[in-house]
Amino acid sequence: MVNYQVHKFSNGLRLLMVPSKEVHSFKCSVMVKTGSDYENKRNNGISHFLEHMCFKGTKKRPSNLVISQELDEVGGSYNAFTSREVTGYWTKVSDYHFKKAIDITSDIFLNSVFRESDVEKEKRVIQEEINMYLDDPKEKVWDNFFELLYKNQPAGWPIAGSKENVLKFRAGDLFSYRLSQYRAKSVVLVVSGNFKAKEIVSLVKDYFRKIPGGKAKEKIKTKEKQIKPQLSLEYKKTDQTHLRLGVRGINLFDPRRYALHVLDTILGGGMSFRLWQLVREKLGAAYYVSSFVESATDRGIWGITAGIDNDRINLIISEILKEWKELKQDLITPKEIKKAKENIRGKILLATEDIHQVANYYAFDLLYKNKIETFEHYLTNILKVKPSDLNKLANDLLKPSNLNLAVIGPFKNKSRFLQILKI
């Protein structure tokens, strides 16, 4: 069992501490309840832009070189990420230098100075990042898939925004957005590794004392509407077709999430499970193929990602849909269910050996559910999943009207795909 403590400060900031005396590392992370889902059409991409700019310098550390050099001197590292609902910053060092990790993380999070000259330079960097994704069909098809599902609302827009938006951002926009979203009650500070809790509480209280109080501006709830199968087809001369095939799933609060985890594992849990054996081993039609579950606070997706043979694209999609149809028809054996549950148990137990990974998992729970579901509790609910739960959920989700297919490849005829979108 992984131990943890949560300390709540008077301003609403929550500190999650996940200790381990078995490691020699220390990681300090800041998780903020904001991302591209919290944006509007005019400022789409600003969460991602702000994340980039927080590494350009502070009053105490006036440049990126000073920040990175300070970490290089102790063999540490730092990075950040922006997703649709969370922005995160982290610093990782040996436990001997734990104070430095807290100092640097708090400094870039609270004290970054957005110089207009740096903003202008970073615009070019982010434009090239966007160009990189646009040139890579394996990545670009993700954006097409989300746009297909959610259309013209935040969930359907790219996380990095458009190049047009990026060009418009000014330092004042970043300051205003940070003030709006980086607030104590919408932040979880996470420390993991080798440390003493009492000392950490004191340091966090000192270094994060300037965080603005209150809560971030909430996002607008995602609207979901679909009455028939949907297709996004982008022509590109490629040697391989990249696709995302999925149905609308369930949100992260839904009690059926345990059954969906088991269903998804039966479909694509590894090389000996259904999807891999069908597409790669039986048909020899793909190098990469996998299933995925994505659950957000107000929506979810269950889908398949693959890069497959151009010449057999219709056959392969049809065969994948047959596998989904079998899940609806209660053709799952007790042996498959047992195997899936043991697979999940094994992966979770292996994950607990990385204390920092555990801390991240718990942090997301705390940020959005205001409570932590331990791995032990999660596994207990996985083991309780019954065959009838799987059959009911498969029939709830796997409906013809629920199908969505995004394709990038050398095709222009939409009808060839629409006619096979049936389960």
Image: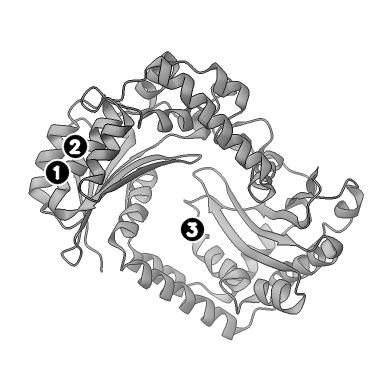
Query: In x, y percent, where is residue 324?
Result: 72, 67
Name the residue carrying label 1: 99
Name the residue carrying label 2: 103
Q: Residue furthest bottom?
A: 335
Which quadrant, please, contains the C terminus?
Answer: bottom right
The quadrant holding residue 306 is bottom right
Query: In x, y percent, where is residue 5?
Result: 19, 53
Name the residue carrying label 3: 255
Which quadrant, please, contains the N terminus?
Answer: bottom left
Q: Give the residue type at disc 2.
A: Asp
Q: Is disc 2 in contact with disc 3, using a CB cutoff of under 8 Å?
A: no
Residues under labels 2 and 3: Cα distance?
Answer: 39 Å
Secondary-structure class at tag 3: loop
The structure residue drawn at horizontal position 42% and vertical position 17%, both measured from the top left corner, is 117
Is 21 situated above or below 252?
below
Q: Is disc 1 in contact with disc 2, using a CB cutoff of under 8 Å?
A: yes
Query: In x, y percent, where is residue 78?
Result: 32, 44
Residues under labels 1 and 3: Cα distance?
Answer: 40 Å
